[in-house]
Image (cartoon, rainbow, N blue to C red):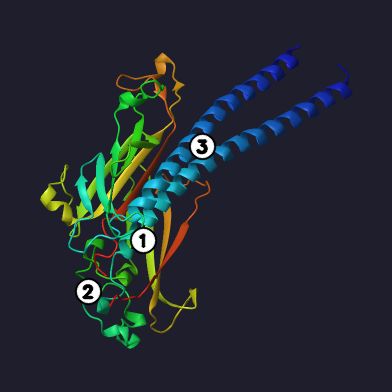
Amino acid sequence: MSTGQTMLTLAALMFLSTILLNFYGLLADTGDDIATGQDGILATTFATSYMELANGLSFDEVTDTSDIAIQNVGALTPVGSLGPESAAEDSIHKFNDFDDFKGFQTEKEIGGTSRRFRATFDVNYVNPSNVTINSSSRTYVKRLDVKIWRTFPAANGARLDTLTMSQVMGYFHFD
Amino acid sequence: MMLGGTLMLIVMNANEIVSENQSVYNGDMLVQEMLTSAAQIIEGELRNMGFGIAENQSAIAQADTSSLTFLIDLRNGGSPIDTVRYILGPVTDLSHTQNTLDRYLYRRENSDETRPIGVVTVFHLDYTTRSGERLTSPVDPGRLIEIHVVEVTMEVQNPYAMLRRTNEVTPGERDAMYSSSIWQQTRLASQNSRR
C-alpha cells in the first residue's frame, strides 16, 4: 500500500468515525427526547392536579365567607398581602382561597416512577383585559403561575426543561 | 483484508444498535400515545364530574380502587342526570397479547353497553376528603359525599414484549421488558364546593 493509499484509508476511517459519532449522538438525543416526553406528561399532570385544587377554592379570603366584594373591589385582599392569611394555612388541605398558593412550594414523587418533581406557585392580580399583565392594584381576576421541574433523577448535564403553566380565575357570583 | 473486516464489524454493530433502539423508541412512543389518548377522555370527563348535581347531593355514586361511578349532566339537559362508570377489566380480556398485565379500561354511560376506552396495566383510584383524610376502599356509601379529591393513577405498557435472554432474568422478574408510561392526576369531586 503506497503512502497515498494509506493516507486515503486513514482519511476514510476518520470520516467514518465522524459519521458514526454523529449517528450515535442522534440516537442518544432521540432517547432523551422520548424520556423528556414522559417527564412532560408527569410534570403536566402534576401541575394540572394542583391547578384543579386551586380552581376549587374561593377567589379570595373575603369572598369565602361574604359577598362584600361584589360591589367593592377594595374589599379584596391587598396586593401585598396575597398568600396564606396565617401560619396555620400551611398545607393545601388548609387553603381556603386561590391566592393561598402564592409562595407555596412542594416536591413529590409521582407514583411508581421514582421521578421527583418540584413545583413553585405564584399568584397575582392581573389586568382583566390582558391577563398576561400583572396588576399593581386589586382586580376581579387573579392568575396562578406554576413552575415545575424534575429534581430526581438529576439532569447530569442533560437538558432539563422547566414547565410553566398558568391558570386564571375570575370572581363571579350566582344570585 | 483486516481493514475491510473491521469496517464490516463497525457497520454491523451500528446496524444492530439502530434496530434495537428503534424498537425501544417505537415502544416508548406507542405507550405515550396510548396513555395520552386514554387520559384525555378521563381527564375531560372527570373535570365535569358532578356538573348539574344539586349542592347537597354527592356527585359520586360508587367508589373503590378500580372503579368509579359518578353523576353528571352530560348533555346539559338538566334531567335525567346521567351516570358514568369507569371500571378496570380483568387481564383475561387481553390474554392474547404478549403482555400479561394489560387489560381494558371500560366506560359505561347510563344503561348503555360497556365500551373499552383504552388499554392499561394500572388504573388505580384514591379518594381524599377536604381535610386530607384518605378514604379506605371501597368507600362506605355513607361517606361518598365526603369525597373531595379523586386521584387517578394510570400506567400503560406496550402489549408487545422485548424478550430478554434467560441469563438476564432474575427470579421474580418477568422474562420480557415492556415500555411503560405513567400518568397521575387529581380531580375535584365537585368544582363549586367552595364557591
Q: SS for tag 3?
A: helix
Pointer 2 residue: A86
Find the residue positioned furthest to the top. B1
The location of residue B24, given as percent across then percent down, is 51, 30
Quadrant where the C terminus of chain A is found in the figure: bottom left
Observer-nearest of B59 and A166: B59
Counting residues from the start of the chain, the first of labels 1 and 2 encountered is 1
Q: Amino acid at mark 1?
A: Met
Left or right of A127 on screen, residue B130: left
The location of residue A93, given as percent across then percent down, is 22, 61
The location of residue A153, given as percent across then percent down, is 41, 44
The image's mark for residue A51 is 1
Residue occupying image coordinates x 44% and y 23%: B161
Residue occupying image coordinates x 23% and y 65%: A90
Q: Is residue B145 above or below residue A71?
A: above
Q: Are both tags, 1 and 2, on one chain?
A: yes
Q: Count up the numbered dots.
A: 3
Task: Identify the subunit bearing mark 1.
Answer: A
Quadrant where the N terminus of chain A is found in the figure: top right
3 or 2: mark nearer the eye:
3
Determine contact: label 3, label 1, CB under 8 Å: no
The location of residue A47, given as percent across then percent down, is 39, 56
Pointer 3 residue: B29
Q: Is residue B1 visible?
A: yes
Q: Are both tags, 3 and 1, on one chain?
A: no
Q: SS for tag 1?
A: helix
Inter-mark Cα distance, 3 to 1 = 27 Å
Inter-mark Cα distance, 3 to 2 = 46 Å
